[in-house]
Image (cartoon, rainbow, N blue to C red):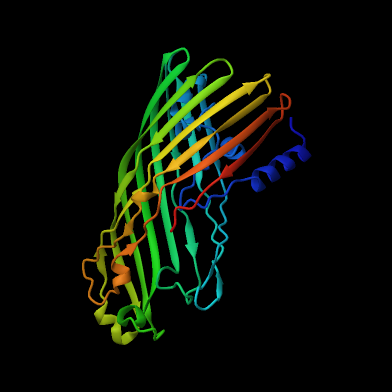
Amino acid sequence: MISKSAFVIMLLLTVFCASGYPAGFLVYNQDATSVAMGNAFTAIADNPSAVFYNPAGMNQLECTQIRSGFQVIVPDTSFKGADSGHTTDMHDKISIPVTGFITHKVNDKISIGGGIFTPFGLVTEWPSRWEGDGVSTYSALRTFFVNPAVSIQVHPRLSLAAGIDYVYSDFKIRRSINLDQITGIPIGLALGKITLDGFDDSWGYNLGVLFHINDTWTLGLAYRSKVNLEFDGHAQYRMRPLLRGLFPPTDISPRIELPPLVSGQIAARFGGKWTVATGFLWTGWSVYDELTPKFRNDFLIPPSMKSSPQDWKDVTTFLLGVEYDLNQTWVLRGGYIFDQTPVP
């Protein structure tokens, strides 16, 4: 049994010792163990979350194992206008992604598993009247991945794995429409609001390699493909009474590509108690180059809303994690992440 004080300590560590990313809307944190080690987990992959991080690690797991969890994400962002110098704080908007994994060892050579997780998407909300209200006052993107996978041990030290992703996604974006967006003259007169929403499902895949170089060193490689989403959506308007007839509801068909992920890491176990892991995570954000809602009826729609260049760039994240088995009850973990933003 764990004492009440020990449970409180573990809860506090779980809540406050998490990692943050500037890398767009990727939520790479899909398991508490990985998060605690700075997500340097590709070359370890020794619990059911291997389905996400490196499915080749499933061969290390005995019998049938289940793992689930959730995380609480509270973005804290502010914007300072280059011309006005005014600072606007984004509203607090809590997201709680949930994950679940299961693995089963079929025999000495084959293991299967599956996972449900949300690696992309968050929610942001800004004041209804602020300098960027023509870009966004509210935006939410959700993605749900269902990922079955199989791993084959082709050699006592080498496992190969592959999986298929079924992806469901939906979004909602709310913006203001101002007269200066249409005329190009900074009049500052608000005409109303536009709300865009839609949904789509698509497919992707993931691959994994786990190679035990020797009894100390392990190499892990993982790849997750990009996912093409072509949303079936709608645009609705809340305009001033005299303008409502000019802005009827219309269909939209925006397209988004979720970026590919490549992870390469190495891990070493020393003295039966220490584990050190390090490596990189590459995210191909250059696929996120433009947002084009493709309005069925774009009469009087400001040009800035018909096409919004993004021009994000590919980024590489460097990861370092350390684990120490203190005793049969306690394991201490720590990690460091050096990340970059893809946003120009």
Q: Quadrant of the C terminus?
A: bottom left
Position above or below: 188 against 343: below
Residue at position x 37%, y 31% in the image: 163
* Residue 47 can be seen in this image: no
Above or below, 209 relative to 14: above
Instruction: Please state which of residues 229 and 309 is positioned toward the viewer in this rendering.
Output: 309
Residue 110: percent from left, percent from top: 41, 17
**Quadrant into which the N terminus falls:** top right
On the image, the x and y values in percent for residue 238 come to: 35, 76
Residue 158: percent from the left, percent from the top? Answer: 44, 17
Residue 271 visible in this rendered orientation of the protein: yes
Q: Horizontally, is 49 left or right of 185 in the view?
A: right
Query: In this rendering, is residue 64 above or below 251?
Result: above
Q: Nearer the viewer, residue 25 or 1?
A: 25
Residue located 44% across and 57% down the image: 343
Residue 234, given in percent of the width and then of the height, sits at 29, 64
Residue at (49, 65) in percent of width and height: 125
Which residue is depicted at the point 27% across and 77% down? 247
